[in-house]
Image (tube, rainbow, N blue to C red):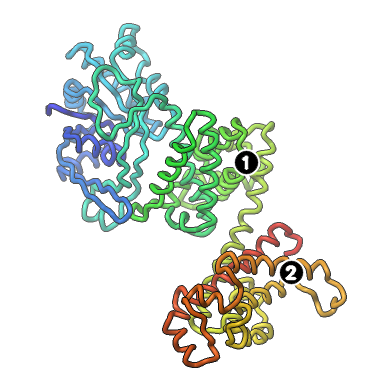
């Protein structure tokens, strides 16, 4: 046996791709103990495996060959490894704790007979809050008082915090390296300092913490919560990856809002400072926004029943915020979104949806969240969000469609006012050929002269009038509709001013191109095109944004007043 050895019970992604990676880098020989015979055979036959640390555009591949792979049935060899090493990492699912703890108990008692009362430390590397007491309960089951005392005095049960993500690797990488573990490269391993027994080799990557409970809660209630918020909102838009969800401004705002909510509660509950939590949240978003890792919406959203339990990543932060008097609009909306998760390949989501069909959403919220009848106000708000979210995202898709149509039409056909009218009315399925025709002169600040209001804005105002406007047969009335129209058009005007500092074609040209073009002049029209007039960031983008803003303003009005649909 090698001088420095680490036993790892569970040779899965975290066992090999995180703990194994850290200890291999520190010069340890790894003894991988695994119940899956096929994996053990693969490890023996290959004699090596790869760990990718993928961060941003950087991909570092580490090849690990300094290991021994043992099946859990090879008791003598496992015992020999226990006799020689002083540290064991347990990286198994919590459902396997009882069986694994029983095996470890027997090996440690035999080790005691051979090497005496030397200290031994067990690192618990699992995604379970406060895993130590549960594992210890199983470890001490059915033994004598003397043996219990040995475990109390000499065996450290050390909770750790696993933040490294190990998702499914890209197919081409897996084909090249069948035993690869694809990770985000997160290097830090927080460990519970006070649980260590005797002398233990602390790796540079280890961060010793005094209050592991606070650290565990912070991790689950920020990292895991953020991923859940992104994925459950992202499902409505059909996103596949978390990075796509983060690129969506409104979904990113939902995640950041929820993080800020729970941040205030964590500060109050555990004494984290504002600066600590601000830095931590920046880290959460940075680690999540990793396109190289390819972390999926499905991975973070799967098994919604477990993720909606009271001590898990959504209801847990909600209750902590409630305890500390923090309002939680974003968390409540995320919980509502989770109840909409419905994927055929995920058994838990099918079970959840069947329960909702039979019992209704309100009873389902009580049943799965564990919220009490005294907390009906929270349930009311979750139910309200559950009802509104599908319509909100339907309108969001209309706004995205308006953007795409506006961009395409202006790039291909030109005529900013007409393109704006067409994009909005087609996205809303209210296209009127006569209104479209009437908008012909809305181009280049009206009639190609750049000294008037941006025609994309006017096109948006015309589209608003089709939805909310004074009717000919009510020429002398419709005051409420007329003034609502003014309010909505003013809102569109404010969007232009916020974005461009002005609503005139000339000023927007100057902001975009550094110069204003009179498009009625053929020479200036040529210069306009050469300067990217209809390029990806030119007037194409102005029209696209105008169309999107118009739909968003209409959506906001209709969502607040559904009777006006």
Q: Nearer the viewer, residue 315 or 441?
A: 441
Residue drawn at the location 58% of the way across and 78% of the way down: 505
Examine the rendering and report whether any part of residue 152 can be seen: yes
Q: Residue furthest right?
A: 476
Examine the rendering and report whether any part of residue 354 can be seen: no
Q: Nearer the viewer, residue 531 or 428?
A: 531
- Which residue corresponds to mark 1? 364
User: Of tags 1 and 2, which is closer to the observer?
Assistant: 2
Task: Classify residue 143 as left or right of residue 250.
Answer: left
Q: Position of residue 556 (x, y in %)?
A: 66, 60
Which element type, helix, strand or loop, lies under badge 2?
A: helix
Residue drawn at the location 37% of the way across and 52% of the way down: 290
Q: Nearer the viewer, residue 536 or 173?
A: 536
- Which residue corresponds to mark 2? 486
Residue 514 sits above or below residue 8 on the image: below
Residue 4 sits above or below residue 199 on the image: below
Placement of the C terminus among the 4 image quadrants: bottom right
Task: Classify residue 265 as left or right of residue 141.
Answer: right
- The image's mark for residue 407 is none
Q: Position of residue 482 (x, y in %)?
A: 79, 70
Q: Are marks 1 and 2 in contact (CB under 8 Å)?
A: no
Which element type, helix, strand or loop, lies under badge 1?
A: helix
């Amino acid at each position: 046996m090698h001088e420095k050895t680490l036993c790892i019970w569970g040779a899965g992604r975290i066992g090999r791709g995180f703990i194994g990676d850290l200890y291999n880098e520190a010069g340890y020989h790894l003894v991988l103990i695994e119940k899956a015979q096929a994996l053990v055979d693969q490890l023996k036959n290959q004699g090596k495996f790869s760990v990718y640390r993928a961060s941003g555009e950087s991909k570092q591949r580490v090849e690990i060959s300094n290991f021994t792979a043992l099946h859990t049935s090879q008791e003598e060899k496992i015992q020999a490894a226990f006799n020689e090493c002083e540290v064991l990492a347990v990286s198994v699912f919590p459902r396997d704790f009882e069986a694994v703890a029983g095996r470890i108990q027997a090996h440690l008692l035999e080790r005691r007979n051979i090497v005496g009362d030397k200290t031994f430390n067990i690192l618990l590397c699992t995604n379970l809050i406060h895993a130590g007491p549960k594992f210890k309960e199983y470890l001490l089951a059915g033994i004598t008082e003397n043996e219990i005392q040995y475990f109390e005095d000499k065996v450290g049960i050390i909770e750790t915090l696993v933040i490294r993500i190990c998702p499914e690797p890209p197919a081409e990488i897996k084909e090249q390296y069948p035993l690869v573990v694809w990770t985000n490269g997160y290097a830090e391993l927080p460990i519970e300092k006070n649980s260590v027994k005797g002398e233990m080799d602390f790796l540079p990557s280890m961060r010793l913490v005094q209050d592991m409970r606070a650290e565990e809660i912070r991790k689950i209630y920020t990292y895991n919560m953020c991923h859940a918020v992104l994925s459950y909102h992202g499902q409505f838009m059909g996103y596949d990856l978390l990075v796509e969800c983060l690129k969506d401004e409104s979904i990113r705002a939902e995640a950041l809002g929820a993080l800020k909510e729970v941040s205030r509660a964590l500060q109050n509950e555990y004494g984290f400072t504002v600066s600590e939590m601000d830095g931590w949240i920046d880290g959460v978003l940075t680690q999540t926004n990793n396109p190289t890792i390819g972390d999926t919406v499905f991975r973070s959203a799967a098994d919604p029943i477990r993720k909606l339990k009271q001590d898990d990543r959504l209801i847990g932060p909600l209750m902590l915020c409630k305890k500390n008097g923090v309002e939680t609009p974003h968390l409540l909306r995320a919980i509502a979104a989770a109840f909409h998760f419905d994927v055929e390949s995920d058994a838990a989501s099918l079970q959840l949806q069947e329960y909702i069909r039979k019992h209704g959403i309100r009873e389902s919220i009580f049943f799965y969240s564990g919220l009490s009848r005294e907390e009906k106000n929270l349930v009311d708000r979750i139910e309200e969000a559950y009802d509104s979210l599908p319509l909100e995202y339907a309108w969001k898709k209309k706004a995205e469609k308006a953007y795409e149509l506006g961009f395409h039409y202006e790039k291909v056909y030109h005529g900013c006012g007409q393109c704006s009218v067409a994009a909005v009315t087609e996205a809303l399925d209210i296209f009127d050929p006569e209104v479209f025709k009437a908008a012909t002169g809305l181009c280049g600040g009206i009639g190609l002269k750049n000294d008037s209001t941006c025609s994309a804005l006017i096109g948006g105002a015309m589209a608003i009038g089709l939805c909310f406007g004074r009717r000919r047969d009510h020429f002398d009335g419709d005051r409420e509709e007329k003034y609502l129209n003014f309010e909505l058009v003013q809102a569109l005007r404010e969007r232009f001013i916020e974005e461009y500092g002005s609503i005139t074609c000339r000023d927007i040209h100057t902001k975009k191109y550094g110069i204003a073009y009179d498009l009625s002049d053929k020479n200036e029209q040529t210069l306009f095109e050469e300067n990217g007039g209809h390029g990806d960031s030119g007037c194409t983008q102005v029209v696209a944004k105008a169309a999107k803003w118009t739909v968003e303003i209409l959506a906001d009005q209709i969502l607040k007043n559904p009777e006006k649909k």
